[in-house]
Amino acid sequence: MSSNLLFFVDEGGFEDYTAMFIEQGFSVDFEDSQRKASKLAKKNSYQVLVAEFSHNPE
């Protein structure tokens, strides 16, 4: 049985590691919307959460 992983990318600009996570045996859900990622995290059970986000105080 594979572990579930949520991969959340807020603004992008970073490499897509989805293929690597799949090679490591994870079932990957990818999301680029903070709202949708939060919804997925509440709905599903994830063993791993990988998130990229930026904080801009402006």
Image: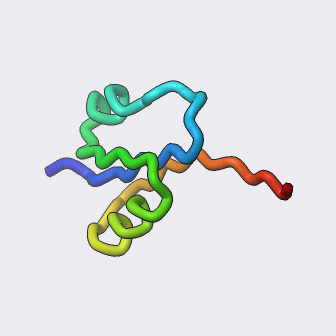
Q: Nearer the viewer, residue 48 or 12?
A: 12
Lateral position of residue 33 relative to residue 52, left or right = left
Residue 48 locus on image (x, y percent)? 41, 54
Colour style of the rendered protein structure: rainbow
Identified at 49% across, 59% down, the residue is 34
Lateral position of residue 12 relative to residue 39, left or right = right
Q: Residue furthest bottom?
A: 42
Identified at 32% across, 27% down, the residue is 19
Residue 2 locus on image (x, y percent)? 20, 48
Instruction: Tell me: residue 19, above or below residue 51.
Output: above
Instruction: Tell me: residue 27, above or below residue 35.
Output: above
Lateral position of residue 13 relative to residue 41, left or right = right
Identified at 51% across, 25% down, the residue is 15
Identified at 36% across, 33% down, the residue is 18
Instruction: Tell me: residue 18, above or below residue 44.
Output: above
- For residue 39, what is the image quadrant? bottom left
Q: Which quarter shows the C terminus? A: bottom right
Q: Nearer the viewer, residue 46 or 7?
A: 7
> Total marks drawn?
0
